[in-house]
Amino acid sequence: MTIGRPRQFNADKAIAQATQQFWRGGYSATSLQNLLDCMSLSKSSLYQSFGNKETLFISCIDNYQITFNQELSALLKSSTSGLKFIEQLLESVIQEVNSIERKGCLLVNTANELGAKDPIITAAIERGFNAVSVTIKKALERAVSEGDLPKNVNLDDLSAYLVVGISGLRTMVKAGADYEKLYRVTQVLLNSLK
């Protein structure tokens, strides 16, 4: 029995490249050839290492949400208060209007594109949104302990409300809304927390 050739590529880098491709083009519009080109892989290497397109996409969504939540956790840790974190997060979302691509959020884009058509992809999206909600809830808990929010506020509902609001903002950014309009919406979201 012979040992197969070792992998000649970096799997993490390949996932990152595939994530960017799906993020720019969406799931349906991303062809197998697009993936092979961006990952610099042969068809057999892709299938052996990552399975089919759907399995690769799930890996990309999971990788995206882990990376995004690491960034959110770092932002929360460095923020001067829980409410300041929420304000910074909202501002970072609407700042994407200055980006040439306006890619939006991979989780929101996928939810808008595929909805609940595929239970495996839907579960991956739900994991991503839940992870974001947990981080936002930590910020809200901090805001309560800092006296910026009342102690009797329902943090689960409030964090879900913010996830919905942020998702809407991301969709509007991608749709071409201007900064001033989106900024006013962020102020409504922030004022509704008090």
Image: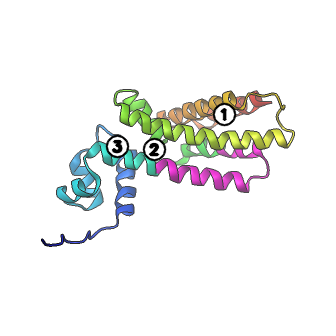
Marks 3 and 1: in contact by CB < 8 Å?
no
Label disc, if present, on residue 75 of the rendered structure: none
**Callout 1 crowding tier (Cα within 10 Å): few <14, some 14–19, many ≥20:** many
Q: Residue at x 41, y 33 (%)?
A: 122
Q: Nearer the viewer, residue 3 or 102?
A: 3
Q: Earlier in the sequence, mark 1 or mark 3?
A: 3
Residue 103 in the magenta stretch? The answer is: no
Q: Which residues are magenta?
A: 64-89
Q: Name the residue that disc number 2 marks.
A: 103
Dot 1 lies on which element?
helix
Q: Amino acid at mark 1?
A: Ser
Q: Name the residue that disc number 1 marks.
A: 159
Q: Amino acid at mark 2?
A: Lys
Label disc, if present, on residue 25 of the rendered structure: 3
Q: Earlier in the sequence, mark 2 or mark 1?
A: 2
- Number of callouts in the render? 3
Measured from the top left, where is residue 189 in percent x and y? 70, 30
Measured from the top left, where is residue 85 in percent x and y? 71, 46
Relative side of 120 to 92, left or right: left
Q: Amino acid at mark 3?
A: Gly
| Residue sitting at the far front | 1
Measured from the top left, where is residue 168 in percent x and y? 55, 30
**Callout 2 crowding tier (Cα within 10 Å): few <14, some 14–19, many ≥20:** many
Residue 79 in the magenta stretch? The answer is: yes
